[in-house]
Image (spheres, rainbow, N blue to C red):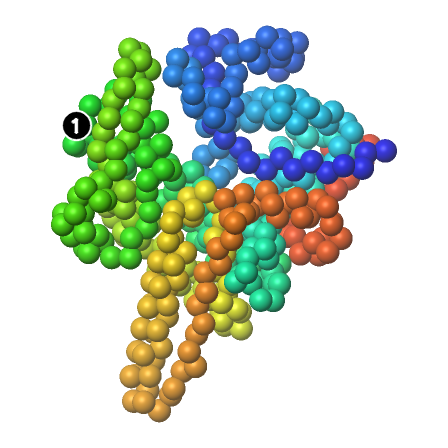
Amino acid sequence: MPTTWCSVLTFGGIAIRESAKVVDQAQRRVLRGVDDLDFFIGDEAIDKPTYATKWPIRHGIIEDWDLMERFMEQVIFKYLRAEPEDHYFLMTEPPLNTPENREYLAEIMFESFNVPGLYIAVQAVLALAASWTSRQVGERTLTGIVIDSGDGVTHAIPVAEGYVIGSCIKHIPIAGRDITYFIQQLLREREVGIPPEQSLETAKAIKEKYCYICPDIVKEFAKYDVDPRKWIKQYTGINAINQKKFIIDVGYERFLGPEIFFHPEFANPDFMESISDVVDEVIQNCPIDVRRPLYKNVVLSGGSTMFRDFGRRLQRDLKRVVDARLRLSEELSGGRIKPKPVEVQVITHHMQRYAVWFGGSMLASTVSPFLDCCLFSFLRSLSSWDERCPVKVK
């Protein structure tokens, strides 16, 4: 009998040759061993400049299921080195995931990989559970608002007692990839001599190594102008074609890149709302009895929330918005109403980057405390998977 849970939670880039032949599923399964030689995922995909890099997931939603299935094959057989028939699987779904996508995922896992059981959990609930490792958390609770920001999408997701308030979820069209593109654009405008084919890779490396969130953008510009030697860093890269070194100065890009979370108009003129305003709007749209607990437990999740001082800046800006509303309420009442101060706290912790995975590992090891908290759970034996199952998945 299978007794082990496997968490398969994080999906990355997939690289294939432009000239790769498209074959049907049956042929692909026969030739899978050969195809895998020309198929790379994650960092291996990014490191293959002669290959076409593709992302089967767009804004958190799976769009290319053929590539996604091949991705799963590599994760399970090459990296986990597991026989799927011998393990239960825990997987996550993004907010606002469609029933059709949920069906398709269950169909692939049961029919293609023959898994004995599947549990599909809500990412935000797992991220809240992972935040319990933070010293900032006094009482363990599954009420809070999760700011989940990865490479392709950012969501503000309110959760009350383990249940996602779906009608109040808000999508933010700014994430890690947008920051990379913005830094790439800034570097191109300066014409710093980066090999064109490596400009995106270089921008990503600079983002991950040097970028941070500043408290005041005007003062930050002045700081660089007064003492450039102290603040301007140098990035050294290797030209992939001639193997020669190239060195570029990294200045304003260090803080301008991630600043688009708080001034999105820098990169996207169609979106003008800062992340602090979005969080406040989401909480204000929630039922009044959960608003204070939500302000008190703003949890960060995902790699794009890892910029230094991100949590501190978000907490400060959100507190300013809340306090301004309370002052306005008092003024409009002519001083008769004295609103009670609202506590605002943004939770950061050491597992923040992999919060969903870490929360999933907690769920996998101690299933019972979480079963009543997840909006969607699906654990069935393979023998009961039939044509009626997709209806039940919804």
Is 146 above or below relative to 76? below
Q: Residue at x 63, y 10 (%)?
A: 33
Residue 51's spot in the image, x, y percent? 42, 15
Quadrant location of the N terminus in the rendered image: top right
Q: Which residue is mark 1?
A: 191
Q: Residue at x 59, y 55 (%)?
A: 133
Is 246 above or below relative to 153? above
Q: Residue at x 16, y 32 (%)?
A: 190
Foreground residue among 344 and 64: 344
Is 367 above or below relative to 179? below
Residue farthest left in this picture: 226
Foreground residue among 375 and 72: 72
Position of residue 311 in the picture relative to residue 270 (left or right): right
Is 1 above or below relative to 366? above
Residue 155's spot in the image, x, y percent? 45, 49
Q: Is residue 301 visible?
A: yes
Residue 254's spot in the image, x, y percent? 28, 42
Q: Secondary structure at mark 1?
A: loop
Residue farthest front in this picture: 230
> Quarter-wise, where is residue 315 in the image?
bottom left
Residue farthest right in this picture: 1
Foreground residue among 20 and 211: 211
> Quarter-wise, where is residue 84 in the image?
top right
- Across the whole image, how many numbered discs are drawn on residues? 1
